[in-house]
Amino acid sequence: MHASTAPWWRDAVFYEIYIRSFADGNGDGVGDLLGVRSRLQYLCDLGVDAIWLTPFYTSPMADHGYDVADYRAVDPLFGDLAQIDALLAAARERGLRVIVDLVPNHTSDQHEWFREALAAGPRSPERERYMFRPGRGASGELPPNNWTSRFGGPAWERVTEPDGQPGEWYLHLFAPEQPDLNWRNPEVVEEFDDVLRFWLDRGVDGFRIDVAHGLFKEPGLPDTENGLHPSMLGYVGPSPMWNQPEVHGVYRRWRRILDSYDDSRMAVAEAWAQDSEDLARYVRPDELNQAFNFAFLQAPWSAAALRDVVNESIQATAGVGAATTWVLSNHDVARHVTRYGDGELGRRRARAALLFMLALPGSVYLYQGEELGLPEVADLPEEALADPIWERSGHTERGRDGCRVPLPWSGTQPPYGFTSEDVQPWLPMPECWSTLTVAAQSEDPDSMLSLYRTALRARKDHPALGNGTLHWLEACRDGWSGGESGTQGPHALAFAREPGLVCAINCGDTPVALPEHQGMLLASEHLDNDKLPPNTAVWLTR
Ligand code: NOJ
């Protein structure tokens, strides 16, 4: 698709704001909408095009907002509807787009519908909005099937009926406080049409669809073969819980709603699919606009693995006319500086990965704090752990708090300007983050933050970057030339974008020759002569 005719989202850089941990505007130790609004200039200076706000809706916070009690209201912890309107207006003024999280697979157990379902009893229309079933065993004392929750333990909870007797069970693929909705019920479908319109009318640019692959369950709810629960963000093979064909009907419906508004409204799927082909079904021309490329996020640090995942993803999405949506981190996975090796090695690789990712065709999602090179905080004290996974796993899995520690903005000690000085942030912040603050890094041209700012500006300015295609350069005796493989030895990769840009990355331990070039636009480390050092990427002009 030609750059000038492409909709804005096709090559946009999005920035995920995990609202609890971004900036605290009211001094209670938890990030909020006021905090986001007060830091919009930071995001403009960083150079992103859009922000994705994680759930800010009314919620008892059993899963930090992914348990929604009212889809049309803002939780007082984060602000109110007036705050959202003010944030949307302030973002629009600065040319920043805003997408919001939509959580359609489950509600909170405090949602009005679920309370009504409990009160109404078995076989009532109120229960038909959820997945209630009688138990197995002589007196229904066993769960309806062997499914397990993604947060650990069984995926079923037994309820006490209005007459005080133990009764039916309801399905929750996540925490018991997150009952799954019944998407075969037209009332559920219509309710979400209306929720979508509610937020589109308020002016949001689109949605991030939570658990987009989960809405429908195989009829009959058959036992799974091994009863195993896939890890939070693990490979999802064929399963009666995920990727059922009916889910695509919902996204066709939503696409019609999105397209009925002006200004290219869009939606991105959080879908865990079996492979790139399966994922591409979510972004067919009449379905959602984007789907996170988690295969890229999970690729090991190897030139061959990166090349394969890029090829496969581009091929699959191009096959349905979509662009690919690259992502390295989010609020559910360990931060990539740490995944890539932690310390200096992880930092170097993260810098190289950024230049590699930003040079690929398509859109990009950044996760707050990656621009500061924040590492995973692996040593949070047990009493501070707040992810439901910690409790549900019987304290065997620490969960996702390590990537959700609040952002350090300024100063030399916690809470580093995240909240008022004498207030404890909702998760403790490390004592050793004084060099990682926004303020400290802003002054340092070699910092991670400076690299992000420079690279995002260069990506915007260079006509070859963003939409388009790539072709790999192949190593030959004298260096690199056009070809199919794109690797030099097993450790380096280079590709060209037209007009006139080459990106090369060295994932190995020894320097490699730079591809032929005229000048250098940007490098993730200082270069020695014409060699690309280990764990380094470069943008060259030619
Ligand atoms: C995916 C979200 O990203 C995660 O944080 C949440 O716990 C689950 N979906 C359940 O809503």
Image (cartoon, rainbow, N blue to C red):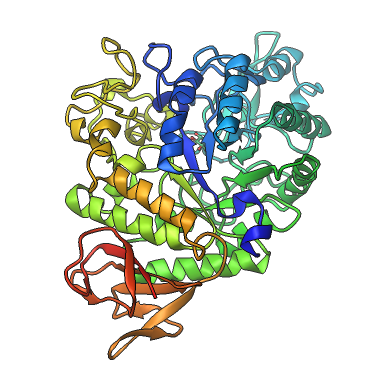
**Does 445 appear above or below 465?**
above
Quadrant in the picture for residue 238 = bottom right
Please state if 150 lies on the left or on the right of 416 as rendered.
right
Please state if 267 lies on the left or on the right of 455 as rendered.
right
Please state if 466 lies on the left or on the right of 305 as rendered.
right
Q: Residue at x 51, y 17 (%)?
A: 78
Which quarter of the rendering shows the N terminus?
Answer: bottom right
Which quarter of the rendering shows the C terminus?
Answer: bottom left
Of residues 284 and 351, which is closer to you in this image? Answer: 351
Q: Residue at x 44, y 85 (%)?
A: 483
**Does 214 appear above or below 71?**
below
**Does 492 appear above or below 370?**
below
Q: Residue at x 45, y 43 (%)?
A: 47
Could you say where residue 337 lies in the image, as x and y percent from the top left? 29, 48
Whether residue 38 appears in this view of the structure is yes
Could you say where residue 384 lies in the image, as x and y percent from the top left? 30, 21
Of residues 260 and 167, which is closer to you in this image? Answer: 260
Number of numbered callouts drawn: 0
Of residues 515 and 511, which is closer to you in this image? Answer: 515
Could you say where residue 447 lies in the image, as x and y percent from the top left? 24, 45
Q: Residue at x 81, y 41 (%)?
A: 260
Of residues 453 and 276, which is closer to you in this image? Answer: 453
Quadrant in the picture for residue 305 = bottom left
Quadrant in the picture for residue 524 = bottom left
Whether residue 331 appears in this view of the structure is no
Could you say where residue 318 lies in the image, as x and y percent from the top left? 62, 67
